[in-house]
Structures are given as structure tokens and as C-alpha cells.
Amino acid sequence: MCSRGLPAQPSSCLLRSADSTRKNFYRIMQRWSKTIGFAGMLGLLAGCQSGSAPVSNVGAPRVMEVVTLPAPTTLVLPADSVELSTRPHSSKPLGLPPWPTNPKSRAWIPFEAWTDYNGFGKPHRTSSSASLSYESRTPDGAFWLRTGSQQVNWNGLECWLAYAPQIMKGMPYIHSLDAEKNLQPLVEAPTPMTKLNRVIVIDPGHGGVDAGARSVWKNSFEKDFTLDWALRLKRLLVANSWTVHLTRTNDADMTLTARVAFADRVNAGFFLSLHFNSAYPNATLAGLETYCLTPTGLPSNLVRNYEDNSDAVFANNAFDNQNLQYACRLHREMLKVDGTADRGIRHARFMTVLQGQKRPAVLLEGGYLSNLKEAQKIGTPAYRQQLAEALAKALN
């Protein structure tokens, strides 16, 4: 669906969200330093093994080590990966040192350290099989993970980590960058949509000679369904005081880079790309998928045949936290439509239409045109209206 693009440089005036990310991370580091010791914290920030034991204090919490492991040589994706066609923490940000410059840091932290920092329930094991499962209660439900699996469940939503949790010294550990980039944004309260720049660009995927995926029901094309979905959503958002621009309003060609430039030209505050999926000839895959740009330093959940350079920095990486927060909001509402299956909130780096966005940006896959049951639903105006209404509700 999307081709690779050259990395774009983030505007300096748009890096405040990245600063917020760093502050959130360092709040966690300060809390963890009480359990792993100052030397251990420095080792974590430098991407090195912790060489000193924590200072022993009366009543100090149980020691939780930070360990380092080599990164896997390749990211093993699930066999069904296919081609693409809250609670806020009340602490104030602290004056802490700048974000470490070593993107190769491979530090792992105890899952319990992260849940304790956020005031969640102590993780307890929910299975005794070879792949251990753990659950921590949250104010709105539960956070669940399974060792050896990148898939986690956050208050009923399926989300994907970059690295599968591992058992070390009898305890579940998570990667420190996953904690910062893929978990902590779920806890922090997102900026209310009413306080955003309420100019949105809706991008109906494909168009013109690029027809997108073909439906197994009536041989219709993705480009027609995405345009209809976008037009329906526009009407609803305009009624809710949004200024709405579409990258295309008819069956026209438009390059991916031109879609990014269009969002710049209208000074959009949010970018939403609409698509439908296909796994043809696999007819069994079904469900909704939501994508954000992969944060710098982490491997992607989906790479296709493209290079996945974890050191790459794109303009949209300045909005990693907001991307994930708004993806969750949109994904959760879409899941309420007609019992659609949840295939998760994921990260990909090759999507040119997201890379250069100087604003929060999300790409949605509204179902599989290669699955007959879903293709029939997608082919009905009533279902596309339901999808539009779900997104409009999420964006209020």
C-alpha cells in the first residue's frame, strides 16, 4: 500500500510532545532508581549492565534488577502478518537530564516495577503453561501480558509490544523502551480532542489507477469504499465543529508524499488515513487493525519487505505518544461496531503517508476484503456509516 519515503526532519516547534515523552520516562526512572539503586539507573540510561547493588535502607522495597540482553537478530512476526493494501499520573515533570543518546540500549525492567510506579495491582500469574501469563489490575480493568508474545491486552484492547516479555530470575521483565513508548502513553491522559487544533485531514486510501485491494464479494475496490467512508465521516465531523479536508474527493490519483504536503498546507492538527485490508488468497483473516509510526529505537510489528531501520527519525516521531493515545481511542470505538474482531494496535515504519506528518497521525484498516463475511459487511453502506459514526464519536 505504502512505499518508503526519505526521512523528514521534525520541526523544532513541534518537539514539545517529544519533551513530554522524555519527562514521563524520567519520572519512571526516578521511581525505579529507588529499587535498582543510582548506579543501576545510570547503567540503564547508558544502555549498560548495572554493576552496583542498590543502597541498603531500612524499609527499602525489594530489589528489582535491570538487566541487558542482546537484541534479537530478526523480529519474528506472527504467521498471519499480511501485506497492508487511563489514568494520568499526577506528578509534575521533574527537571531531569536530557534523553540518552544511545538508541541501542537493551535494558529490561521488571513488569512489577512499571505497575508499581503507576499504582496498579501487583502482577499475578494467570497460567502455568510454558508461556506464562500475568495480569495487573488497573482502575479501568486489567493489563495482561504473556511471556514470549508481543501481544498484550490493555483494558480490553489488544496492543503490540516491540519485544516479547521474558522471564528472568522467576519474574516477568519488559523492555525499557516498550515501557516508555508502548505502555506509558496508555496510562497518561491524552489531550482532549476539544483542545486540539480542530483541523483534520481525512485520507481515503488509494484512488485513481491505484485501486487498492479487491473485494471477494462483487469484486469491488478498496478505493471506492475508503472514499465513501471518508465522505460519511466528514459530514459527521463538520456537524461537530471540525474543519475537515479530504486528500481526495473523487477517484483521483494522489501520491503519498502529496498527501503529507496537503496536510501541511491546510495546517492540519490531526491526520487520519482510511483503508481496508486484504490477505488474499487467505480467506480466514478478519478484524480491525490500527497503525502508528514506529518510535525510534524500536523494531516494527510489520515490515513487509522493507528495511526497518530502528535508528531512523521521522517528523512524526515527535508525536509518538499522541499517535498511540489517539489510535487507542479510535480503535476502541470501532471495535464496538457489529462485534468486529480485534487484531490490535500496531506499529510500522515503512508507511510514507505517516512518516512526514508534523501532527498526530493514525492509519486504520477497517476490515478484510479477502474475508467473505467481512467483505459483505464492508460492501454495505450501513456498515460504512457505522464505522464513520464510531470514528466521529472517538474524535469528540
Image (cartoon, grey):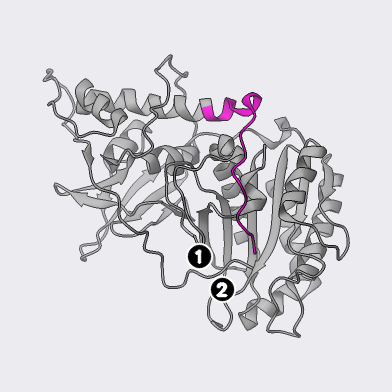
Q: Is residue 7 magenta?
A: yes
Q: Is residue 260 magenta?
A: no
Residue at 37% x, 45% y is: 137
Position of the N terminus, as image quadrant, is bottom right
| Mark 1: amino acid | Asn
Q: Is residue 370 left or right of residue 146?
A: right
Spot the residue most to the front: 6
Spot the residue most to the right: 250
The one of 305 and 286 positioned closer to us in this rendering: 305
Q: How many marks?
A: 2
Question: Neighbour class for label 1 at 10 Å: few (<14), some, many (≥20)?
Answer: few
Q: CA distance from mark 2 to mark 1?
A: 22 Å
Question: Neighbour class for label 2 at 10 Å: few (<14), some, many (≥20)?
Answer: many
Res. 298 in view: yes
Q: Nearer the viewer, mark 2 or mark 1?
A: 1
Return the mark for residue 286. Answer: 2
Residue 221 % position (x, y): 76, 75
* Residue marked by disc 1: 305
Residue at 65% x, 24% y is: 13
Residue at 53% x, 76% y is: 285
Q: Which residues are magenta?
A: 1-18
Res. 139 in view: no
Position of the C terminus, as image quadrant, is top right
| Mark 2: amino acid | Ala
Secondary structure, magenta segment, majority class: loop
Chain-order first, disc 2 or disc 1: 2
Residue 48 % position (x, y): 23, 33
